[in-house]
Image (tube, grey):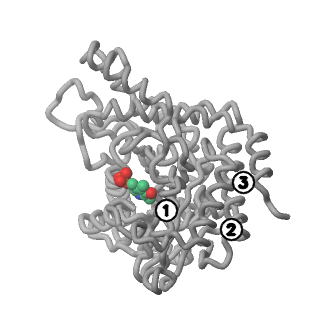
């Protein structure tokens, strides 16, 4: 059955989550399909940050650490978001960046693994993991005498052996949108006594997560993608209660101390996840992030994650169906799994080398630039020259909090026009920017 623009409009009219869009400031004339890279601004954020600057900072100054609750903000936000991760109270803090939190938890995992099984020498991860995860893992291996093993997704379960100490995986792959079965992989790893670290950057706020049900050991994730916390928003970190107090994390700063304001000369880590804090926290950034988390809290009355996931799958299903029916014959291949249980909240289209202008390159970068010029904001991820995913990728993120069904129709219609007119051949769409 052919899908029409009218069908899409009707689906928006019937969408129980439609009202959530009003919590955000969306730039006029744009269809924003990049919320998996930088989430949009919650409308409340500007006033909230202004209040923190003008009142809490400018007027109340140092008293705000107590009076405005600044000192507890990382844990308070952690508690607010914990249910969305399947975590319990006082198990999550928002702090630092994903890269830094990854360094902390991987170091802790390496120390725990060395205590439990000194003969284990391998840190396993996925070859197509996000580069910062690979770089931090490399650095951890160099410091702890571990060997980094890079796997293809289908090799992971077979690679879980008695030499492996740690398995580090990103739940939803940033480049393909493919999602791992967290519970199944964690159980298989635990059967071989391997610690599991999950990176939730592309899944937190986008797909259902239950860290306790999956019995994960550690998790980290991003505040500025699906959580809409603002550019460089603090990230989160979680550790299972059975491992959280087993060792101090390596960045032993005073905010992770058991009693920071006793100013003792020696470090004693706080009990629980607070030990994962390091130094003084960025209150302006945490305040903006809170506005992003508040929208998730508001969505609970409308069905919460179950409703968000249902809409996310409906949006990505619709996008796939429309691209396949309306943009056929232009060399785009679906790089994201069709099976719902294997898909995050984004759709990636691959384009092979040789399809670019005069047979050079894939043309994917220029197609994305032409879409951006039309107000359809997706992004481009380069094929990685022989490792992991080989082809260039056009990437489209669908955030159910604010993307609608008509948006999907219009985005595909622009894509169809860009391909059919060949406007992406124009030289202006081929100039590379630093951030793609
Ligand atoms: C976005 C992302 C990061 C970002 O890390 P930063 O420290 O915030 O730069 C890390 N890992 C994954 C998997 C990501 O998707």
Q: Which residue is mark 3?
A: 314
Q: Closer to the observer: label 1 or label 3?
A: 3
The image shows residue 241 at horizontal and vertical percentages of 47, 43
423 or 246: nearer the viewer: 423
139 or 408: nearer the viewer: 408
Question: In the picture shown, does residue 140 fall above or below 420?
Answer: above
* Residue 407 visible in the shown view: yes
- Dot 2 or dot 1: first in sequence order is 1
Instruction: Tell which residue pokes out farthest to the left in this image.
Output: 265
Q: Closer to the observer: label 3 or label 2?
A: 3
* Residue 216 visible in the shown view: no
- Dot 3 or dot 2: first in sequence order is 3
Question: In the picture shown, does residue 134 fall above or below 238?
Answer: below
Q: Which residue is mark 1?
A: 174
Which of the labelled discs sits on residue 338, or is there none? 2
The image shows residue 316 at horizontal and vertical percentages of 66, 58
Dot 3 surroundings within 10 Å: few (below 14), some, or many (20 or more)?
Answer: some
- Quarter of the N terminus within the rendering: bottom right
The image shows residue 117 at horizontal and vertical percentages of 38, 65
Horizontal relation, residue 398 to residue 192: left or right: right
Q: Is mark 1 within 8 Å of ligand 1?
A: yes
- Quarter of the C terminus within the rendering: bottom left
Residue occupying image coordinates x 30% and y 34%: 281
Horizontal relation, residue 34 to residue 247: left or right: right
Which secondary structure, mark 1?
A: loop
Q: Is mark 3 within 8 Å of ligand 1?
A: no
């Amino acid at each position: 059955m052919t899908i029409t623009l009218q069908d899409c409009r009707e689906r928006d009219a019937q969408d129980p989550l439609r009202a959530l869009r009003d919590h955000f400031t969306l730039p006029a004339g744009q269809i924003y399909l990049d919320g998996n890279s930088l989430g949009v601004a919650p409308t409340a954020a500007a006033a909230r940050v202004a209040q923190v600057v003008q009142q809490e900072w400018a007027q109340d100054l140092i008293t705000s650490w107590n009076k405005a609750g600044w000192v507890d903000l990382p844990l308070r936000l952690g508690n607010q978001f914990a249910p969305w991760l399947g975590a319990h109270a006082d198990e999550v803090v928002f702090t630092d960046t994903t890269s830094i939190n990854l360094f902390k938890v991987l170091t802790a995992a390496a120390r725990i693994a060395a205590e439990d099984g000194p003969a284990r020498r391998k840190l396993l991860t996925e070859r197509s993991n996000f580069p910062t995860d690979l770089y931090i893992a490399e650095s951890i291996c160099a410091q702890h005498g571990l060997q980094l093993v890079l796997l293809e997704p289908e090799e992971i379960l077979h690679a879980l052996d008695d030499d492996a100490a740690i398995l580090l995986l990103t739940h939803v792959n940033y480049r393909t949108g493919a999602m791992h079965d967290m519970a199944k992989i964690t159980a298989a790893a635990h059967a071989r006594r391997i610690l599991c670290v999950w990176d939730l950057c592309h899944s937190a706020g986008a797909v259902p997560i239950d860290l306790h049900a999956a019995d994960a050991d550690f998790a980290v994730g991003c505040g500025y993608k699906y959580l809409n916390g603002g550019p460089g928003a603090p990230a989160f970190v979680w550790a299972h209660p059975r491992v959280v107090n087993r060792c101090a994390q390596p960045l032993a700063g005073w905010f992770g101390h058991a009693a920071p304001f006793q100013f003792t000369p020696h470090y004693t880590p706080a009990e629980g996840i607070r030990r994962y804090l390091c130094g003084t926290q960025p209150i302006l950034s945490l305040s903006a992030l809170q506005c992003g988390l508040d929208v998730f809290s508001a969505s609970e009355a409308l069905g919460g994650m179950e409703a968000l996931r249902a809409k996310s799958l409906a949006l990505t299903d619709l996008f796939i169906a429309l691209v396949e029916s309306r943009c056929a014959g232009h060399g785009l291949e679906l790089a994201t799994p069709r099976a719902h249980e294997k898909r995050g909240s984004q759709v990636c289209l691959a384009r092979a080398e040789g399809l670019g202008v005069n047979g050079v390159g894939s043309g994917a970068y220029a197609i994305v630039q032409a879409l951006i010029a039309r107000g359809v904001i997706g992004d481009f991820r380069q094929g990685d020259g022989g490792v992991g995913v080989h082809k260039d990728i056009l990437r489209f993120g669908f955030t159910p909090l604010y993307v609608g069904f008509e948006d999907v129709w219009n985005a595909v219609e622009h894509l169809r026009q860009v391909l059919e007119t060949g406007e992406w051949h124009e030289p202006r769409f081929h100039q590379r920017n630093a951030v793609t």
